Amino acid sequence: MIVVPEFMIIQDLSDERWLSCIKKSPQANLFHHPVWMNLLAECYGYHPFIIAILDENGEILAGLPIMEISSIINARRWVSLPFTDHCKPLYRDKECLDLLAKGFTQLINKKHITRVELRWEIPLNVTMYPSAQYTLHSLKLEDDFERVASRFERVHRQNVRQAEKNGIRVKWGENLEDVREFYNLQLATRHRHGVPSQPWRYFKLVTMHLIEKGYGSVLLAYQGEQCIAGIVLLHWQNTLICKYAASREENMKLRANNLLFYMAIRWGCENGFKLFDMGRTNLDNPGLGRFKKGWGADEMPLNYFTISRTPRQPVPGNLMKIVKPIIQRSPRWVCQFAGELFYKYFG
């Protein structure tokens, strides 16, 4: 007898079947973990769930995390996942992925969802519009850090030595005070770029749900007593993720960013991680792409897709073009206030 796999929605993120699935999958990272989805749900009021294909024993053959977002700016939509650089479906083989895609398509039609946003390409039997294009950089790690470091470009090695000569001191942050230091840098960086900053509440939850529970770290660079640069690292299983990086523009020549990445990569090698995910890079920012590639990172296209009745850009995307020059010309508190009020709508 042929057993047809069961398609289902898992509402309880602590379901042992999903936890077992992500622990067994080499493709899974922290973005698939319930702690990440619960953090977003608590901070922004989103509704998380997982769509999955199960075999006759109740084990997940394929699955994908989803967030349902409702707001005054956009109609109800599904996103996989908001504020997440990428979220690939997990599956045992192509047949399981096809079954997941078929069930997902039927579910979208059944629930009358007019907009679905995907941070990875999935073979759905519906019209999908390309909504954004990026480059994803990732560096393969080994236990032998020196072998990994041999792939660094000469300029990066020189800049690391320069940072050390400049007296840059690196600190591994582990508490809310350290995260507050990074938040101040992030606020300055976002203001410089003309985009609203994440609300402080978000970084408090990152501290509580991730850093204090062993899923993340904040790495800070100081000159004297002044914090001039920082990165937020997330980690689980084999993958170390650089989620955020921020710095003071006036101190860029001190090369603190180079030292931070060097220390992060070395720490990843020494702690058994196999991949350093440097995140997405906008195509119109080739300088950042060269910086990441200079560490020996591989690069690949990262495309986002939208399922919608029309290929229009969502309202937040259009709104950002308007608010960017306003934020850049305004006091920094405007950047902070805009993030506190509206950031959740940009998921």
Image (tube, helix red, strand yellow):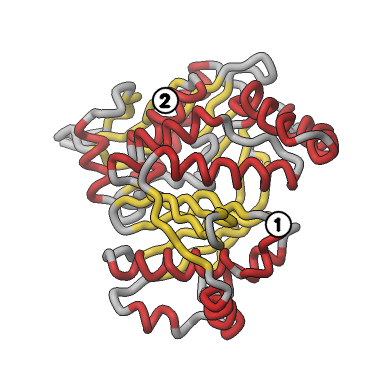
- Residue at 50% of width from left, 23% of height from top? 68
Q: Which residue is mark 2?
A: 48
Q: Which residue is mark 1?
A: 249
At label 2, the amino acid type is: Pro
> For numbered disc 2, what is the local secondary structure?
strand
Q: Quadrant of residue 345?
A: top right
Distance of label 2 from label 1 (alpha carbons): 37 Å
Depth order, front residue of 50/258: 258
- Observer-side mark, 2 or 1, equals 1
- Residue 130 in view of the camera: no
- Residue at 37% of width from left, 83% of height from top? 146
Depth order, front residue of 300/189: 189
Q: Earlier in the sequence, mark 2 or mark 1?
A: 2
Few, some or many residues within 10 Å of mark 2 (<14, 14–19, 20+): many
The N terminus sits in image quarter? top left
- Residue at 28% of width from left, 53% of height from top? 237
Give percent across and percent down for residue 17: 21, 34
